[in-house]
Amino acid sequence: MRLKLVFSRGSAQCVALTRDTRGAVMLEYTILIGVVGISAAAALVLLGIAFVDSFSFLREMLLTPFP
C-alpha cells in the first residue's frame, strides 16, 4: 500500500514537471540570441575584409591633396 502511494505521488510529480513551461521562454530567447550572435559574427568575418579595404581606400582618397 505504501509503495503504491509513493509511486502515485512520484508519477504526479513527473506529470507536473512535463507540463511546466516556465523555462521554455528563456530557452527560446537564448537560442534566438545565439543564432543572431553567430550570424552577426559570420557576417563580420565575411564582410570585414571588404569593409577594411573600402575604409582604407576612402581614407587615402580623402587624404590625397587635390592637384
Image (cartoon, helix red, strand yellow):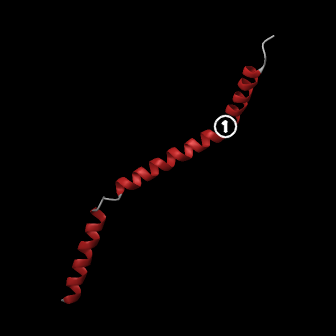
Count the numbered circles shown: 1
Q: Position of residue 48 (x, y in %)?
A: 66, 37
Height in image: 62 above or below 23?
above
Residue lying farthest to the top in this orientation: 67
Nearer to us in this view, 40 or 56? 56
Nearer to us in this view, 30 or 13? 30
The residue located at (67%, 32%) in the rendering is: 51
Q: Position of residue 27 (x, y in %)?
A: 40, 55
Quarter that holds the C terminus: top right
Mark 1 surroundings within 10 Å by alpha-carbon count, few (fewer than 14), some (14 through 19), many (20 or more) = few
User: In which quarter of the view is residue 10 placed?
Assistant: bottom left
Q: Which residue is mark 1?
A: 48
Nearer to us in this view, 1 or 16? 16
Height in image: 6 above or below 33?
below
Height in image: 29 above or below 43?
below
Nearer to us in this view, 1 or 26? 26
Quarter that holds the N terminus: bottom left
What amino acid type should be assigned to the residue bearing mark 1?
Answer: Gly
User: In which quarter of the view is residue 45 placed?
Assistant: top right
The residue located at (60%, 39%) in the rendering is: 43
Q: Position of residue 14 (x, y in %)?
A: 29, 71
The residue located at (30%, 65%) in the rendering is: 18
Residue lying farthest to the left in this orientation: 1
Q: Is residue 44 left or right of residue 63?
A: left
